[in-house]
Image: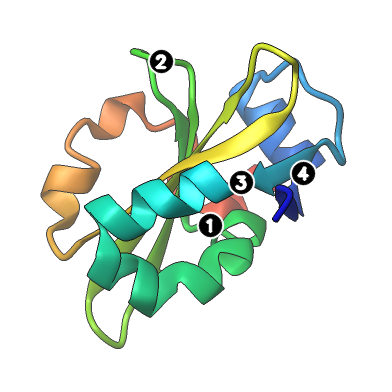
Amino acid sequence: MAAQQVSTFQSNIITKLGLSVEPGTPIYLGESNIAHMKSKHPADYEKYGDHIPAILDSPDYIRTNPKNGSVEYVKEFKIDNEFVKVAVRISGAGRVYLRLHFVSSRIQNLLRDVRRLICTYMRDCA
């Protein structure tokens, strides 16, 4: 199975984070990425894997990771009081791939450095 497009970069996120990608740049999910999530975060992937496009299209929080330059999207699922984080990175070939997916029920751990968050709630990014 080839990599599938799960979303695109939105102009409001590009502007807010100062990214050097074009609006509409596809975000892909490849087989190796799915295999990684299934092996490292199987329960999370089972529960939230189908929500990945929605997390990327309407995150509650976004930031760039200062260590690796990835863009992190976080969505709060209020029913279970869980926060799901999805990170994407631009490959050497210029394609953008989803790299990480995990759940945290403790927002302090997931968003521990609020000052580094570029945009707290997406409604601030409009």
Crowding at mark 1 (Cα within 10 Å: few <14, some 14-19, many 20+): many
Residue positioned 26% across, 58% down in the render? 41
Q: Nearer the viewer, mark 3 or mark 4?
A: 3
Q: Which of marks 2 and 3 is in front?
A: 3
Q: Is mark 3 on a helix, strand or loop?
A: loop
- Is the residue 76 above or below the residue 102 in the image? below
Q: What element carries label 4?
A: loop
In the image, residue 108 lies at what x, y percent? 13, 48
Residue positioned 16% across, 65% down in the render? 105
| CA gap, disc 1 and disc 3 | 21 Å
Q: Nearer the viewer, mark 1 or mark 3?
A: 3
Crowding at mark 4 (Cα within 10 Å: few <14, some 14-19, many 20+): some
Residue 107 seen in this snapshot: yes
Give the residue at mark 3.
Answer: 30
Give the residue at mark 1.
Answer: 59
Along the polypeptide, which appears first: circle 3 or circle 4? Answer: 4
- Is the residue 73 above or below the residue 96 in the image? below
- The reply to whether dot 2 and dot 4 touch (C-beta < 8 Å) is no
Q: Which mark is residue 68?
A: 2
Residue positioned 77% across, 44% down in the render? 10
Q: Which amino acid does label 4 sit on?
A: Gln
| CA gap, disc 2 and disc 3 | 19 Å
